[in-house]
Image: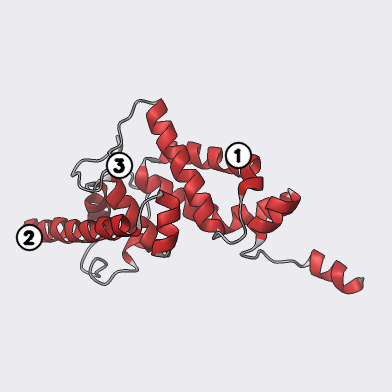
Amino acid sequence: MLLSIKSWLFETPSKDCMASYAKSGDNRYLEQLIALYSNDLYHYLVTQSNTHLAYDVSQQTWLKVIEKRHLYQAQTTPKAWLFKLARNTLIDEYRRQQHFVELDENTHLAAQNDESESDLNSGDLTSGDSHIGSSSISYEAFDAALKQLSFVQREAITLQQEGFSLTDIELITQSSLETIKTRLRYAKQNLKRLLGANNEQA
């Protein structure tokens, strides 16, 4: 009995707290989820929109976690499930605002931010790909290049930099594996081209 009380008092956030919250509805597990994933969730949303919309959608997403917790399946990666909710919420919000978002990976146009996101920490996006991340490329240059990609290309590269597997990205975007690979390939090619052009101009 003493052991179980001790484990409850000193419980640390675990990757399985989504499953625990889905079963119990205990706000303790919701707080753990927010502590684990809120920063990453906001970071993803701000790369796909702007600071104001990202904050609004992140709040809506956590409300949906509360409403839809019973739909969570334990075999699903908790972070991927959260990001899927966030993505769907963001697209719904764009549609509500009649803000067109092209979801075809072959497009060269995307829903661009209407404001400068100087507070976006784009350095996190450069850390995982040696072909893109480079000490000679500034965070500002990478951020500017990233914003020129289509919605789905920017999304794919951002999710990969968040550490998601291709299977996770399939779940989040509800797209096929080959589609994801195509988006990543185009995204990396376009980033290299854009960053190369920036270096030449410099």
As drawn, is 13 to the left or to the right of 154?
right
Kindly identify the residue that appears in the image at 30 percent across and 48 percent down: 152
Which label sits on residue 179? none
Scheme of colours in the image: secondary structure
Which label sits on residue 200? 2
Q: Which sits earlier in the primary sequence, circle 1 or circle 2?
A: 1
Task: Give the Cα separation between the discs numbered 3 and 1.
Answer: 25 Å
* Element on which disc 1 rests: helix
Which label sits on residue 103? 3
Kindly identify the residue that appears in the image at 29 percent across and 55 percent down: 179
Q: Which sits earlier in the primary sequence, circle 2 or circle 3?
A: 3
**Amino acid type of the residue that numbered disc 2 sits on in the rendered structure:** Glu
Kindly identify the residue that appears in the image at 92 percent across and 71 percent down: 1
Q: In which quarter of the image is residue 73?
A: bottom right
Residue 162 on image: x %, y %: 42, 61
Q: Quadrant of residue 159?
A: bottom left
**Amino acid type of the residue that numbered disc 3 sits on in the rendered structure:** Leu
Instruction: Give above or below for 141 relative to 118.
Output: below
* Element on which disc 2 rests: helix
- Label 1, residues with CA under 10 Å away: few <14, some 14-19, many ≥20: few
Which image quarter holds the C terminus?
bottom left
Residue 126 on image: x %, y %: 31, 64
As drawn, is 1 to the left or to the right of 46?
right
The residue pinned by badge 1 equals 63
Kindly identify the residue that appears in the image at 51 percent across and 42 percent down: 58
Q: Which sits earlier in the primary sequence, circle 3 or circle 1?
A: 1
